[in-house]
Amino acid sequence: MKKELRAAVIAGNWKMNCGPAAAKALIEDLKPLAANAECGVIVCVPFVDLQVALEATKGTNIKVGAQNCHWAESGAFTAEISAGMLKELGVEYVILGHSERRQYFGETDVTVNQRLRAALNAGLKPIVCVGEVLEQREQGITEEIVRMQTKVALMGVSEEEMKSIIIAYEPVWAIGTGKTATADQADEVCGQIRKVLAELYGEAVAEATTIQYGGSMKPSNAKELLEKVHVDGGLIGGAALKAADFAGIIDAAK
Ligand code: PGA
């Protein structure tokens, strides 16, 4: 396994936190702390913060992402935001298939795939989330679940398009619960995802794809997780809301 082939990426998922003023303040705090990062740094902010975030990160190493996009280019979809709209604004990344979207808003593997297609067509870089719930882990079907989520999400995605995709393994039982997967558990499932990528696209693509771990990652556990051969970064919720904590995780990626 050649971990050095892959770009380490630490992405913050702010979820439904921070209005534009707080977003600007958080990014201003983060800018000096992240300036010497040896990994990619992304903040995925609420839609209403995107413009402020793009403005505040101009000329820095911090990239901006949204937290979802719709699958259609435009049309009668009240309250939805299309991938093209995000692209027009200057957004580079978009989280897709987060477990909270699946759990509370009825998103399925198929709609995740449709959104992924739309994001790629618009020129966005998707961060695709997969992960098992606690019952599935207890039933011993984590690998099957994650394999299926990955395969369906990537339907119709070409080898070339894989270059702009990040996959985030987020065990649902570890999100916002303070319960982190052990580094070995995270590495095992990220490795299983890499195996699926090898089956679909060959070893070279599998080796080059960034696979993040997400779920209660914080400065105190980040190093151990990020040292694992298959864990190429993190998708950070709670700890992304404090500049010092997020910077601590960025430092752990060195
Ligand atoms: P958490 O969230 O770090 O607060 O567990 C991670 C996520 O949901 O992306």
Image (cartoon, helix red, strand yellow):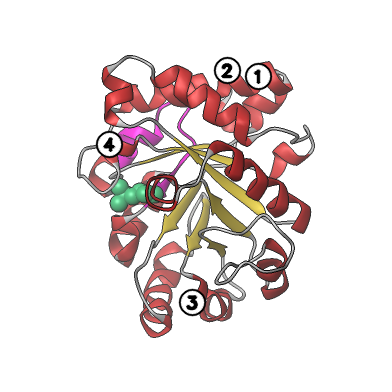
In which image quadrant can residue 21 be found?
A: bottom left
Task: Tell me where the magenta segment starts and ends, as one range.
Answer: 222-236
Residue kind at label 1, given as amino acid type? Ala
The picture places residue 211, in percent across and down from the top left corner, at 52, 35
Which quarter of the rendering shows the N terminus? top right
Q: Earlier in the sequence, mark 4 or mark 3?
A: 3
The answer to whether the residue bearing label 3 lies less than 8 angstroms from the nearest atom of ligand 1 is no
Which of the two marks, 4 or 2, is nearer to us in this view?
A: 4
- Tell which residue pokes out farthest to the front in this image: 76
Which residue is painted at 49% across and 36% down in the image? 232
Q: Earlier in the sequence, mark 4 or mark 1?
A: 4
Q: Are marks 1 and 2 in contact (CB under 8 Å)?
A: yes
Residues at marks 3 and 2, CA–CA distance in whole angstroms: 37 Å
- For label 4, the SS is helix
How crowded pointer 1 is (Cα within 10 Å; few <14, some 14-19, many 20+) is rated as some
How crowded pointer 4 is (Cα within 10 Å; few <14, some 14-19, many 20+) is rated as some
**Magenta span includes 141:** no
In which image quadrant can residue 137 be found?
A: top left
- Numbered mark located on residue 173 in the image: 4
Residue kind at label 4, given as amino acid type? Trp
- For label 3, the SS is helix
- Numbered mark located on residue 49 in the image: 3
- Numbered mark located on residue 198 in the image: 1
> Which residue is tagged 2?
195
